[in-house]
Image: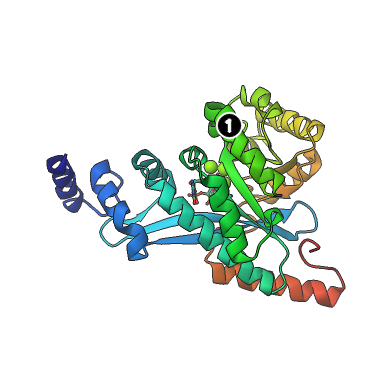
């Protein structure tokens, strides 16, 4: 195994860093040390009210920049972290870091929520509930301040086991969002028995809805479904004003995407929140959610 790792590391060094072709073992070795080296950081992407443009929440998105491999995209290193179990300590760090950041923004007067992605591997940890509640308490936050994003895949795979812990978190006020929604059909049935507050429509449907009947009908059906179950909806990957307007027309409440804001470092989003707040104050409208 060590030999194998050594070989793929050599292969990796002989190629462009970050080219995406290095063997997984080399990456795993680097990822193991990433937390301690401080190579993991969070970006924050705002979620906006579809009309009115208030920032209601921020999603924490993990970034890994390695000295040798360069910037590795989450779609590549998250699966590696899941397979190796590294997602457990990494996910705990993400939660703590995101909650501490929200506490700072709270102190500055922003009333929005923090959304954190949670892997199915984390959901399977028996102490996840204690970990989340402990983090909230340490940061002086309430359950209502946090939204956990789980993938539709996780709902399907492990509905029964995961839903017990999620139900306890939800009882403490934590909001549960289903990410990338619309990709798997059976989930509609599972969702009826799952503790959920928010559906995040996958960007494939959001972006396809303008041009294709099929995607548009999927979004319409999901909106009807969400209404019937009293769930909030977020449209992911909104890149154009036409897409935003269509989401508003179809009745989706929140939008997230490059049109309105890319994932940015905490300081940048903090500046945005502050300027939104001062312009709301001078126009007499309250900024963000009421506390
Ligand atoms: P996700 O949770 O669905 O996050 C949304 C992804 O879409 C992000 O990719 C974001 O940068 C990207 N995005 C946002 N707006 C737009 C847009 O308008 N157009 C396009 N084309 N893309 C947009 P990112 O940051 O590369 O993350 C990819 C995935 O990695 C995430 O998908 C999530 O599943 C996972 N991930 C990221 N951070 C974490 C984490 O801390 N923990 C876990 N378990 N997974 C994470
Ligand atoms: Mg997400
Ligand atoms: Mg996702
Ligand atoms: Mg998503």
Q: In which quarter of the image is residue 7?
A: top left
Q: Which of 164 and 252 lies nearest the eye of the viewer? A: 164
Q: Can residue 25 be seen in this view?
A: yes
At mark 1, the secondary structure is helix
Q: In this view, does 269 lie to the left or right of 80?
A: right
Residue that appears at 34% across and 62% down:
36
Q: To which residue does mark 1 refer?
A: 155
Q: Can residue 239 be seen in this view?
A: no
Q: How is the image coloured?
A: rainbow
Residue that appears at 64% across and 25% down:
190
Q: Is residue 279 left or right of residue 163?
A: right
Q: Where is residue 265 in the image (x, y as percent from the top left)?
A: 52, 66
The quadrant of the picture occupied by the C terminus is bottom right
Q: Is residue 97 left or right of residue 165?
A: left
Residue that appears at 48% across and 43% down:
122
Q: How crowded is mark 1: few (under 14 residues within 10 Å), some or many (20 or more)?
A: many
Q: In this view, does 95 lie above or below 152?
A: below
Q: Which of 279 and 127 lies nearest the eye of the viewer? A: 127
Q: Position of residue 275 (x, y in %)?
A: 70, 74
């Amino acid at each position: 195994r060590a030999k194998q790792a050594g070989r793929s590391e050599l292969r990796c060094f002989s190629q462009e860093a970050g080219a995406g072709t290095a063997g997984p073992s080399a990456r795993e070795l680097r990822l193991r040390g990433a937390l301690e080296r401080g190579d993991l950081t969070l970006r924050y992407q705002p979620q906006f009210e579809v009309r009115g443009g208030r920032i209601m929440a921020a999603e924490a998105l993990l970034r890994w920049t390695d000295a040798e491999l360069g910037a590795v995209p989450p779609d590549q290193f998250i699966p590696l972290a899941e397979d190796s179990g590294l997602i457990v300590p990494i996910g705990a760090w993400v939660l703590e870091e995101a909650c501490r950041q929200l506490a700072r923004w709270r102190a500055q007067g922003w009333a929005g929520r923090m959304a954190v992605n949670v892997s199915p591997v984390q959901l399977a940890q028996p102490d996840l509930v204690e970990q989340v509640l402990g983090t909230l308490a340490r940061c002086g936050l309430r359950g209502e301040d946090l939204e956990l994003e789980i993938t539709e895949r996780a709902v399907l795979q492990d509905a029964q086991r995961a839903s017990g812990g999620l139900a306890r978190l939800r009882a403490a006020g934590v909001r549960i969002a289903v990410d990338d929604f619309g990709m798997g059909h059976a989930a509609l049935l599972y969702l009826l028995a799952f503790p959920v507050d928010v559906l995040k429509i996958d960007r494939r449907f959001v972006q396809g809805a303008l041009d294709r009947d099929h995607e548009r009908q999927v979004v319409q059906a999901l909106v009807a479904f969400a209404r019937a179950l009293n769930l909030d909806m977020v449209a992911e990957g909104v890149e154009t004003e036409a897409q935003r307007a269509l989401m508003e027309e179809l009745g989706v409440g929140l939008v997230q995407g490059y049109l309105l804001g890319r994932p940015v470092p905490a300081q940048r989003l903090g500046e945005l929140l502050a300027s939104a707040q001062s312009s709301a104050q001078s126009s007499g409208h309250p900024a963000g959610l009421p506390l």
